[in-house]
């Protein structure tokens, strides 16, 4: 895997260093944990959106669904 060039604001770096010291955790561990939470939250949002999109396609009431259908 190729190395990534990641830039962080100075305030973010300062917060990372402060929390690293307070929590006695490596900065990489903090970043991994934060990204895991971010990915889980975004995946949940995508699942919710997909459900909403599916519901929107099947959101017809009885009359709308059967409108124009002749049953003989």
Image: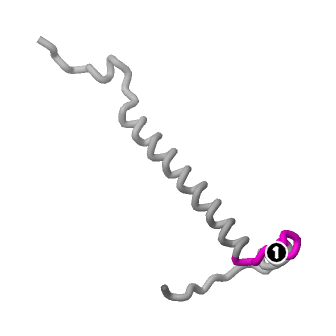
Tell me what residue is drawn at x 32 percent, y 17 percent. 63
Residue 41: image location, x then y, percent: 60, 54
Determine the residue positioned at 34% across, 18% down. Answer: 62
- 22 in magenta: yes
Residue beneath the point at 86% across and 76% down: 21
Residue density around tag 1, few if under 14, some if 14–19, many if 20 or more, within 10 Å: some
Give left or right: position of 62 versus 69.
right
Total numbered badges shown on the rendered structure: 1
Residue 49 against residue 62 in the figure, above or below: below
Considering every residue shown, the one lying at the far front of the view is 24
Q: Is residue 14 above or below residue 57?
A: below
In the displayed image of the protein, which residue is found farthest to the top? 72
Q: Which residues are magenta?
A: 19-28
Kind of element beneath mark 1: helix
Task: Say which quarter of the image contains residue 66.
Answer: top left
**Residue bearing mark 1:** 20
């Amino acid at each position: 895997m190729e190395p990534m060039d990641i830039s962080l604001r100075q305030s973010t770096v300062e917060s990372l260093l402060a929390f690293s010291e307070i929590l006695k955790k490596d900065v990489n561990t903090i970043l991994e944990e934060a990204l895991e939470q971010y990915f889980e939250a975004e995946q949940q949002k995508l699942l919710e959106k997909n459900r909403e999109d599916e519901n929107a396609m099947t959101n017809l009431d009885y009359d709308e669904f059967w409108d124009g259908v002749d049953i003989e």
